[in-house]
Image: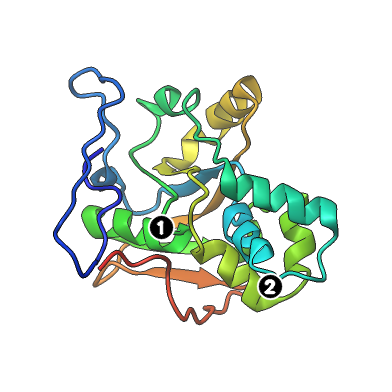
Amino acid sequence: LVGGDTDRTPGPITIAVTALGEIAVGKTIRRGGARAGETVFVTGTIGDAALGLMALRGSLADLAPAASGFLADRYRLPRPRVALGPRLVGVATASIDVSDGLVADLRHLCEVSGLGGVVEAARVPLSPAAHEAVAGERERLLAAITGGDDYEILFTAPRSAAESLARLAAEIGVPITAIGEMVSAPRPAVTVRDENGRPLPLAAEGWTHF
């Protein structure tokens, strides 16, 4: 991992390099392998961290303490899917972690793959606490899918892989949800559709480092 914390600052450039392990040659799942027509999948639930930060800042005062505490914990202590990730080798065609935000990170994948992405908002998996926090509030839903810090795995795979992925999810104990599709597009872009198929306007796609 090189430069994951790189950001704009008034001071000198600082780049962190962290080496946590190794991978066999040719077994890396890169961002650039997606193909048009493939399904976009994500692990776990999305938006807990972003909503947790909102709760900690007092922006979700109407939320029950149990739900608020759950979301805050998800923000403070991410659960990277280290057991599931290696099992996606040979199945996933492209992959990225959800750190900048679901939409922003899918866009990163689109840019390298030279494709567009479509996300069905109603299919994005939310935890019970996140459902309670969103509760029909569109702005909160948009905050959940653009907020980041979930550290779930966002990946693409052929439609034919759906059954094997369902078995893998059951075996590992981590949900894997189909949330959209990769499409041919004149330029890399992500469209988020509402329950009626209409594009949702996004003020921002996620965290911008620079």
Residue 114 on image: x %, y %? 23, 59
Q: Is residue 128 above or below residue 119?
A: above
Foreground: 160 or 106? 106
Q: Is residue 26 above or below residue 182?
A: above
Q: From where the camera sits, is residue 183 visible?
A: no
Q: Residue at x 50, y 43 (%)?
A: 152
Q: Amino acid at mark 1?
A: Asp
Q: Is residue 74 left or right of 30 when viewed as pictured?
A: right
Q: Secondary structure at mark 2?
A: loop
Foreground: 93 or 201? 201
Q: Earlier in the sequence, mark 1 or mark 2?
A: 2
* Image quadrant assignment for residue 8: bottom left
* Image quadrant assignment for residue 176: top right
Q: Quadrant of the C terminus?
A: bottom left
Residue 42 on image: x %, y %? 52, 45
Q: Amino acid at mark 2?
A: Ser
Q: Secondary structure at mark 1?
A: loop
Count of numbered circles in the view: 2
- Residue to which mark 2 is pinned: 59
Q: Is residue 110 left or right of 166 when viewed as pictured?
A: left
Q: Residues within 10 Å of mark 1 (few under 14, many from 20)?
A: many
Residue 182 on image: x %, y %? 39, 56
Residue 146 on image: x %, y %? 50, 65
- Residue to which mark 1 is pinned: 100
Q: Is residue 136 left or right of 192 when viewed as pictured?
A: right
Q: From where the camera sits, is residue 121 visible?
A: yes
Q: Quadrant of the N terminus?
A: top left
